Image (tube, rainbow, N blue to C red):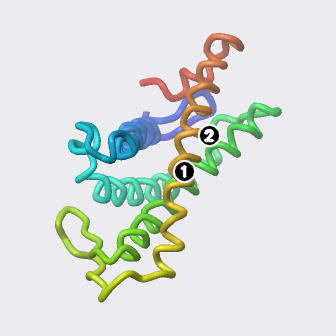
Amino acid sequence: MLNDNKERYGSITRFFHWLVAVLVLQQFFKFADRINEGEHWLGDTFGPWHVSMGAIILILTITRLLWTMTQKPQRPINLGMDGVIAKLVHRLMYLSMLVMPFLGALYIHGKGYPVKVFGVELIGKPAGEVSWALALGEWHSPFAFLLAFLVIAHIAGALYHRFIRKDDVLKRMAG
């Protein structure tokens, strides 16, 4: 089943969800830069891919939002306070995934470096630091912490539905 229905999400929605989940988890390894002044195997291993993976997440997020709009009429309905909280968490996660790549690019550019995705220079190296870009780019990190919190809340909500409510909410996204 490709399309969503009232009981469960379709294979395309599930594909987007789990692919983005894995990529976002990989992005969180960048937090390892805060360990031992960035000299940590996690940062060394995953850090060089951070910008490129962020670009992929941005493209997938936009594509997923476009797909979601086509599926809205037949999607499962979340009622009550649980539905309100779920919508808020999802919208904030989408917002974070949409703005973080731009904020990250502004941070890099603001620090005086070119912005490269998979080795392709998208924004050239400035003559020096660009204070306005750096000031805006500084918001990348708070959004990263917000996204980490939201992901934890999202997982906690799924576990709440599975083990406390004992309903089928988690099965909607399971393969």
First of labels 2, 1 by sequence position = 1
Q: Residue at x 33, y 85 (%)?
A: 128
What whole-number distance in Å separates the C-alpha atoms at marks 2 and 1?
A: 9 Å
The residue that label 1 is drawn on is 68
Circle 1 — which element?
helix
Which circle marks residue 96 in the picture? none
Left or right of 79 in this view: 110:
left
Return the residue nearer the eye: 115 or 41. Answer: 41
Q: Residue at x 26, y 44 (%)?
A: 39
Of the 4 image quadrants, the one containing the C terminus is: top left
Instruction: Tell me residue 43's x, y (percent).
Output: 28, 44
Q: Is residue 156 above or below residue 57?
A: above
Return the residue nearer the eye: 135 or 146. Answer: 135
Left or right of 91 in this view: 147:
left
Instruction: Tell me residue 60's x, y (percent).
Output: 40, 54
Binning the other alpha carbons within 10 Å of mark 2 as few (below 14), some (14 to 19) or many (20 upward) gives some
The residue that label 2 is drawn on is 75
Q: Residue flagged by tag 1: what amino acid is it? A: Thr
Q: Residue flagged by tag 2: what amino acid is it? A: Arg
The reply to whether dot 2 and dot 1 touch (C-beta < 8 Å) is: yes
Of the 4 image quadrants, the one containing the N terminus is: top left
Left or right of 116 in this view: 147:
right
